[in-house]
Amino acid sequence: MAFAAKLLSNRLSQLKAQAHYISQNTKGSSRRRTWKTTASVSFPEIRRSLFVGPPPLTACVFPVRSLGTGDCLCACVSRKPGLMASPLRFDGRVVLVTGAGGGLGRAYALAFAERGASVVVNDLGGDFKGFGKGSSAADKVVEEIRRKGGKAVANYDSVEAGEKLVKTALDAFGRIDVVINNAGILRDRSFSRISDEDWDIIHRVHLWGAFQVTRAAWDHMKKQKFGRIIMTSSASGLYGNFGQANYSSAKLGLLGLANTLAIEGKKNNIHCNTIAPTAGSRMTESLFPQDIMEFLKPDYVAPLVLWLCHESCEENGGLFEVGGGWIGKLRWERTLGAVVREKNQPMNPEAVKANWMKICDFENASKPQKIQDTVGSIVETTGKIGSDGRVSTNHTSQAASSTATSGFVDAIGHKLAPFSSAYTEMEAIMYALGVGASIKEPKDLKFIYEGDSDFSCLPTFGVILAQKSIMSGGLAEIPGLSINLAKVLHGEQYLELYKPLPRAGSLKCEAVVADILDKESGLVLLVDVYSYSGKELICYNQFSVFVVGSGGIGGKRTSDKVKETVAVPNRRPDAVLTDTTSLNQAALYRLSGDWNPLHIDSNFASLAGYKKPILHGLCSFGFSARHVLRQFADNDVSRFKAIKVRFAKPVYPGQTLQTEMWKEGNRIHFQTKTQETGDIVISNAYVDLVPTSDTLNKTPSEGGELQSALVLEEIGRRLKDVGHEVVKKVNAVFEWHFTKGGKTAAKWTIDLKNGTGKVYQGPAKGSADVTITLSDEDFMDLVLGKLDPQKAFFSGRLKAKGNIMLGLKLQTIFKDHAKL
């Protein structure tokens, strides 16, 4: 607690500044508003989500320690002003608050009374260590409530006499609706110094006292079919704290008590929730300076308690941390674990050691909510242990393994219902925009303007045409398998094109389960989809679908039908391209047919464990493929052959995608990262390109040799045979300035005026009749006839000075040698 005080003191000035900023920005508002704030914090064993009224000044009151490899702490805050809802009232309700003479209890009592409740203010009147007693603390709070027009009576009994407290409520008001178990004391000692008395008094007040008061009210609540109960735990109980072994054990015991009461009381509309507050009180006033006590006012905790106790609140069995205007809900998280014994064999610690990393791996963790989730999964898993240590499908025999995998026999080769995918230029353009094509990049116009003379579908649009087999729920109909679609993840993707996609058309798609692999933590389904135009195969997709938690049944782990990923080279990338995704990127991409609310609905994303909606993996896939196509194929879709990727981590709309590329022959290896975090989101990926002629397919040297140089050298060789004739036709000297990345990278001269002609690197030896400047890439398009020189000139891509008309004579050369 002392360390927490120091931390809070150090942060206070910053927090005050933030609070001042917020107050300044809300001044002058013509309507009263509230703030809606959401956030999430992930730990290996506990997951939190936030929903709070006033703007949070911090997301953590106590220091956060590193929890080990793979642990993460993430938070997202979004504020949305909204009109205040009608106030929550407690008219006719009777509320009993223990320890209500000061601090949190007083804040609760005043707040309930202000909203119409009749309140029993209980306080023994002793100090924070439990010594002494008196009536003044409770009396002052009762007097304050009555002075404001509220209804309240005092009770001075110890919570260990729970029936007396409840009797006070019944005698004064005739019923009991809400019990706030708030009373508490401290007897802090290091573990070796705790006496029996220190241990017993803490447990009697906190745990035994809460039990006694709640039990006394329980039957009354059952009869009236209504009850709300709050247990007060502590961060010390949740995480432990030096010097508080007695206190932390009692506080965690309250959580267990509350969880059971939530289960037993549910059918009678009795809800029980637990809070772990951090606030100024009699127990903390000696630890925190006054300015921190002001920041941690009990008033910032009371709104949560009132909401949890309102008749309209359906929360039951929840656990919340709260303090300073911040509220977080906690839940348990459990690894998939590992089976470390074999049937009819003794279990040993060496097996535990060998599986320790798997036992502690929180990837694909489950989130148990009830005891059946734990006991059931253990019985189910360990009951499947076969004699070879693998997991089979029933509780008795290794032979059951063959029973499980026999289900694979029915599934493998299963054909999903065939379907047709029709599209027009509009769908192709919508997809291109969804994966980042933009008018900012002139070469993208061919993908987003149907009037472009070279209008084309992006090659990766082929995935959209095939995805209906996965999106339509057909996986749930595969015989021999029981697939929970909520646990399906897209692991890898392969696409191969046999010819460029037509600009519009209708493809018939046939899907088949090619194979099933057992990865222990889940099954991998290989779904092959063949897309035909008439009888002609246009493209082939392989979707690698991972079904979480369905593995470990003795199936094979590898298959020759898998389109394997390939690790990227261990050297610096040859090229890097970036694109910043729009905040609306997922909203735009989903119009191409992936309607999963995970990518648009914040509430749904939160349920899935994400701080906000994530971008579609296939959207990042499309961005990356565009980068490769632009960098190494100049957006020539006829050169695209195949792509394979593995989806590694999620991307959030608004993040910048950075594609790192390595060229090895006609294969372009790549990986994609989010620039903001450096996380690899697509790994072990590649694009295969269709080879061009030998000359154009040569890889530039490390020194930066240009493709134009290869062509000019070839022209020079050919001039040896036809130079005399060409010189007669042209009679001019051309000086070329080739650019790369906007800068002049090389100068070449084509002398078709002197002797039999000559081509050499460097400026003209003498004066040039025409000087032409253009990029290395545009020169190649010019040579191949893909770029019209007049259009290039008027668009500014080709610049010329001197006798420009002589440039027309160059077409004679390029037409004759267009197949270079």
Image (tube, rainbow, N blue to C red):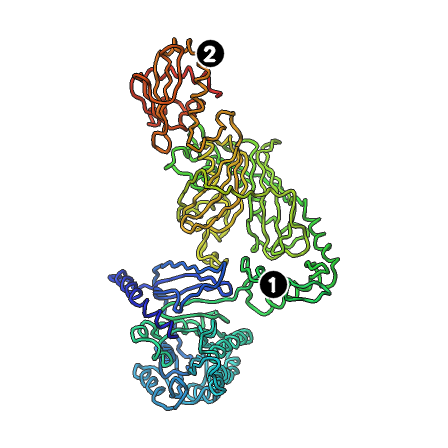
When asked about the image quadrant of residue 417, the answer is top right
Q: Tell me the element at label 2.
A: helix
Q: Which residue is more in the foreground, 82 or 561? A: 561
Which mark identifies residue 721? 2
Residue 116: in sight, yes or no?
no
Lateral position of residue 523 relative to residue 221, left or right: right
Lateral position of residue 196 relative to residue 739, left or right: right
Residue 358, compared with residue 228, is above or below; it is above
Residue in view at x 48 percent, y 60 percent: 71
Would you call the spot at circle 1 few (<14 residues within 10 Å), some (14-19), or many (20 or more)? few
Count how many numbered circles sit on residues in the image: 2
Where is mark 1, residue-wise?
A: 353
The picture places residue 422, in percent across and down from the top left corner, at: 54, 37
Residue in view at x 50 percent, y 80 percent: 221
Q: Tell me the element at label 1.
A: helix
Task: Check the image and name the residue furthest to the left.
Answer: 28
Query: What quarter of the picture does the N terminus occupy?
Result: bottom left
Mark 2 is on which residue type?
Asp
